Amino acid sequence: MALDTDKIIEDLKGASILELNDLVKAIEDEFDVTAAAPVAAAGAGDAAAAKSTYDVELTEAGQEKVKVIKAVRDITGLGLKDSKDMVDGAPKNVKEGVSEDEANDIKSKLEEVGATVTLK
């Protein structure tokens, strides 16, 4: 069975957004695939919303370095020396592959003590 590409394209042009969404879901279910490319092309805001894990990077320690070291120690469970080395070596990832809620929680804890944090 040969596909009539021109007819398929014409049918898609006449479809509503809801119909296209249903088509994508049906294709994903039938062939066990995901349509990741359209999400990435939708824009930075949509791509960020679709992201499921984050890396929390300590970008700068700020003026209260001792407080930042203590916060890093509490967050990571590392010893004092390892926490100090992490803060001294900024920019460094404090935690990797965490949920959005956990990433925001870590970010707020570090920013409270004067650190600059980036979520990636």
Image: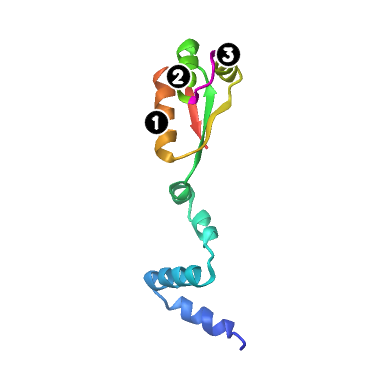
**Quarter containing the N terminus:** bottom right
| On screen, residue 18 above or below 9 | above
- Horizontal side, residue 17 vs residue 92: left or right: left
Residue 12 image point, x, y percent: 47, 77
User: What crowding class fits label 3: few (fewer than 14 Cα within 10 Å), some (14-19), or many (20 or more)?
Assistant: few
Q: Amino acid at mark 3?
A: Lys
Which mark, by number, is residue 71?
Answer: 2
Marks 3 and 1: which is nearer the front?
Answer: 3
Q: CA distance from mark 1 to mark 2?
A: 12 Å
Sequence-wise, which precedes: disc 2 or disc 3? 2
> Which residue is depicted at the point 46% across and 76% down?
13
Image location (x, y in percent) of residue 56: 50, 32
Please, what secondary structure does the residue beneath circle 2 have?
helix
Residue located beneath label 3 in the image: 81
The one of 114 and 97 positioned closer to us in this rendering: 97
Q: Residue at x 55, y 18 (%)?
A: 83
Find disc 1 in the rendering and name its residue.
Answer: 105
Alpha carbon of mark 3 to alpha carbon of mark 1: how far?
23 Å
Q: Amino acid at mark 1?
A: Asp
Residue 29 % position (x, y): 48, 69
Label 3 with label 1: CB-CB less than 8 Å? no
The structure residue drawn at horizontal position 58% and vertical position 18%, both measured from the top left corner, is: 82
Q: Between residues 56 and 83, which one lies in front from this camera angle? A: 83
Amino acid type at circle 2 is Ala
The residue positioned farthest toward the bottom in the image shown: 1
Gap in Å between the C-alphas at discs 2 and 3? Answer: 13 Å
Q: Are marks 1 and 2 in contact (CB under 8 Å)?
A: no
Range of the magenta residues? 76-81
